[in-house]
Amino acid sequence: MSLLAVPILTVAALVCSILSLAVLFIITARGKVRFTLLESQWQANELLLNNLQLTNNTLQNSIKNVQKKHECSLLEHTQVSKQLEHRINTLKIQLHNQQESIILLQDEKSDDKFYSRAIKLAKKGAAIDEIVDECELPYAEVEMLLSIYQKNSA
């Protein structure tokens, strides 16, 4: 080997070493950039995760509040329904009583019609048998009506 060959090899080795160091430096610099980028993304993801957790907590609290309000409303509606059912039953009983009263009044009124008709016939001087047949009243009551109204007429 010549004397020149040794320095060329040394220079070549030195150039290769410098190139290797340059490449290593470039790779390291890119790695640092990527590392910085990944670190920023990681921090952004941490912030996003914290925001999502806060939002989740807020939503859970809102859901609990809505559930409490719903339970209160349900209880109130149940109580109101029971009160309304009681009122309806009371009104049904009152309606039934009123209907019975109406039926009784109608029966009395129909009896009054017979008596009114009997009185008119008695005032006109109709016979007792005629009044009993037309008004469907007992014989004794017609006799009493005739005695009262014939005395008034005479």
Image (spheres, rainbow, N blue to C red):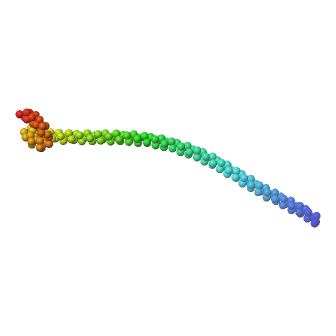
Residue at 74 percent across and 55 percent down: it is: 30
Image-based side of 66 in relation to 149, left or right: right
**The quarter of the displayed image where residue 93 is located:** top left
Q: Is residue 120 above or below residue 18?
A: above
Q: Position of residue 84 (x, y in %)?
A: 38, 41
**The quarter of the displayed image where residue 79 is located:** top left
User: What is the total number of numbered labels drawn onto the structure image?
Assistant: 0
Residue at 11 percent across and 35 percent down: it is: 144
Q: Position of residue 78 (x, y in %)?
A: 43, 42
- Could you tell me which quadrant the C terminus lies in? top left
Image-based side of 33 in relation to 105, left or right: right
Q: Nearer the viewer, residue 46 or 86?
A: 86
Q: Position of residue 56 (x, y in %)?
A: 58, 46
Residue 149 visible in rendering: no
Residue at 10 percent across and 37 percent down: it is: 143
- Could you tell me which quadrant the N terminus lies in? bottom right
Residue 23 visible in rendering: yes
Q: Position of residue 80 (x, y in %)?
A: 41, 40
Q: Nearer the viewer, residue 22 or 76?
A: 76
Which residue reaches farthest bottom? Answer: 1
Q: Is residue 78 above or below residue 14?
A: above
Image-based side of 39 in relation to 1, left or right: left
Image-based side of 70 in relation to 84, left or right: right
Q: Nearer the viewer, residue 145 or 6?
A: 145
Residue at 84 percent across and 61 percent down: it is: 16
Q: Is residue 25 above or below residue 76?
A: below
